[in-house]
Image (tube, grey):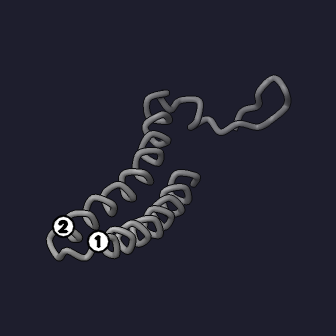
Protein backbone atom coordinates (compact mmCIF):
# COMPACT_ATOMS: atom_id res chain seq x y z
CA UNK A 1 0.00 0.00 0.00
CA UNK A 2 1.23 3.44 -0.80
CA UNK A 3 0.29 6.78 0.69
CA UNK A 4 -1.12 9.84 -0.97
CA UNK A 5 0.37 13.26 -0.20
CA UNK A 6 -2.23 13.80 2.54
CA UNK A 7 -1.00 10.80 4.53
CA UNK A 8 -3.99 8.63 3.63
CA UNK A 9 -3.13 5.06 2.64
CA UNK A 10 -4.36 3.99 -0.76
CA UNK A 11 -4.75 0.62 -2.35
CA UNK A 12 -2.35 0.11 -5.27
CA UNK A 13 -5.00 -1.86 -7.15
CA UNK A 14 -7.30 1.18 -7.32
CA UNK A 15 -4.54 3.28 -8.85
CA UNK A 16 -3.98 0.75 -11.63
CA UNK A 17 -7.64 0.11 -12.44
CA UNK A 18 -8.65 1.83 -15.69
CA UNK A 19 -11.30 4.52 -15.36
CA UNK A 20 -13.76 2.76 -17.68
CA UNK A 21 -13.83 -0.23 -15.31
CA UNK A 22 -14.70 2.01 -12.38
CA UNK A 23 -17.36 3.83 -14.38
CA UNK A 24 -18.85 0.60 -15.71
CA UNK A 25 -19.44 -0.67 -12.17
CA UNK A 26 -21.46 2.40 -11.24
CA UNK A 27 -23.23 2.39 -14.60
CA UNK A 28 -24.29 -1.22 -14.03
CA UNK A 29 -25.73 -0.31 -10.65
CA UNK A 30 -27.45 2.77 -12.05
CA UNK A 31 -29.09 0.88 -14.89
CA UNK A 32 -29.98 -2.30 -13.02
CA UNK A 33 -32.34 -0.67 -10.54
CA UNK A 34 -34.65 1.29 -12.87
CA UNK A 35 -34.63 -1.38 -15.57
CA UNK A 36 -35.88 -3.99 -13.08
CA UNK A 37 -38.75 -1.73 -12.05
CA UNK A 38 -39.55 -0.79 -15.65
CA UNK A 39 -39.58 -4.48 -16.63
CA UNK A 40 -42.06 -5.25 -13.85
CA UNK A 41 -44.23 -2.35 -14.93
CA UNK A 42 -44.32 -3.50 -18.55
CA UNK A 43 -44.93 -7.13 -17.60
CA UNK A 44 -47.76 -6.15 -15.25
CA UNK A 45 -49.33 -3.92 -17.90
CA UNK A 46 -49.23 -6.67 -20.52
CA UNK A 47 -50.72 -9.19 -18.10
CA UNK A 48 -53.46 -6.71 -17.21
CA UNK A 49 -54.28 -6.28 -20.89
CA UNK A 50 -54.38 -10.05 -21.40
CA UNK A 51 -56.47 -10.90 -18.32
CA UNK A 52 -58.48 -7.63 -18.29
CA UNK A 53 -57.70 -7.07 -14.61
CA UNK A 54 -56.44 -3.50 -14.69
CA UNK A 55 -54.72 -2.11 -12.56
CA UNK A 56 -54.07 -4.96 -10.11
CA UNK A 57 -51.43 -6.94 -11.97
CA UNK A 58 -49.62 -3.75 -12.97
CA UNK A 59 -49.45 -2.64 -9.34
CA UNK A 60 -48.48 -6.09 -8.08
CA UNK A 61 -45.76 -6.65 -10.65
CA UNK A 62 -44.37 -3.14 -10.18
CA UNK A 63 -44.20 -3.52 -6.39
CA UNK A 64 -42.61 -6.95 -6.74
CA UNK A 65 -40.08 -5.52 -9.19
CA UNK A 66 -39.38 -2.65 -6.78
CA UNK A 67 -38.52 -5.13 -4.04
CA UNK A 68 -36.44 -7.13 -6.51
CA UNK A 69 -34.68 -3.95 -7.62
CA UNK A 70 -33.71 -3.11 -4.04
CA UNK A 71 -32.47 -6.66 -3.46
CA UNK A 72 -30.32 -6.46 -6.63
CA UNK A 73 -29.10 -3.00 -5.65
CA UNK A 74 -27.94 -4.19 -2.24
CA UNK A 75 -26.35 -7.29 -3.76
CA UNK A 76 -24.44 -5.28 -6.36
CA UNK A 77 -23.31 -2.64 -3.85
CA UNK A 78 -21.93 -5.35 -1.57
CA UNK A 79 -20.24 -7.09 -4.49
CA UNK A 80 -18.62 -3.96 -5.90
CA UNK A 81 -17.57 -2.50 -2.57
CA UNK A 82 -15.35 -5.48 -1.77
The residue tagged 2 is: 49
Q: Nearer the viewer, residue 40 or 28?
A: 40
| Image height of 55 relative to 81, above or below | below
In the image shown, does 5 or 68 lie closer to the viewer?
68
Residue 17 point in image, percent of width and height:
50, 32
The quarter of the picture where residue 51 lies is bottom left
Q: CA distance from mark 2 to mark 1?
A: 7 Å
* Viewer-closest of 56 and 24: 56
The first of marks 2 and 1 along the sequence is 2
Residue at 44% in and 70% down: 63
Q: Residue furthest top?
A: 5
The image shows residue 28, relative to residue 5, as above or below, that is: below
Give the image quarter of residue 47. Answer: bottom left
Q: Provide residue 54's location: percent of width, then percent of height.
A: 29, 71
Residue closest to the eye, 52 or 36: 52
- The residue that appears at 55% across and 59% down in the rendered structure is 78
Q: Classify the position of the C terminus by image quarter.
A: bottom right
Helix, strand or loop under label 1: loop
Percent position (x, y) of residue 31? 41, 45
- Mark 2: which secondary structure? helix
Q: Which residue is mark 1?
A: 54
Instruction: Say whether marks 2 and 1 touch (CB < 8 Å).
Output: yes
Q: Which mark is residue 72?
A: none
Above or below, 26 relative to 74:
above
Query: What is the quadrant of the N terminus in the image?
Result: top right
Amino acid sequence: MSQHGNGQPSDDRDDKTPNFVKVSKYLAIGLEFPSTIFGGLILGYLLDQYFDSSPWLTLSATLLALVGGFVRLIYMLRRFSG
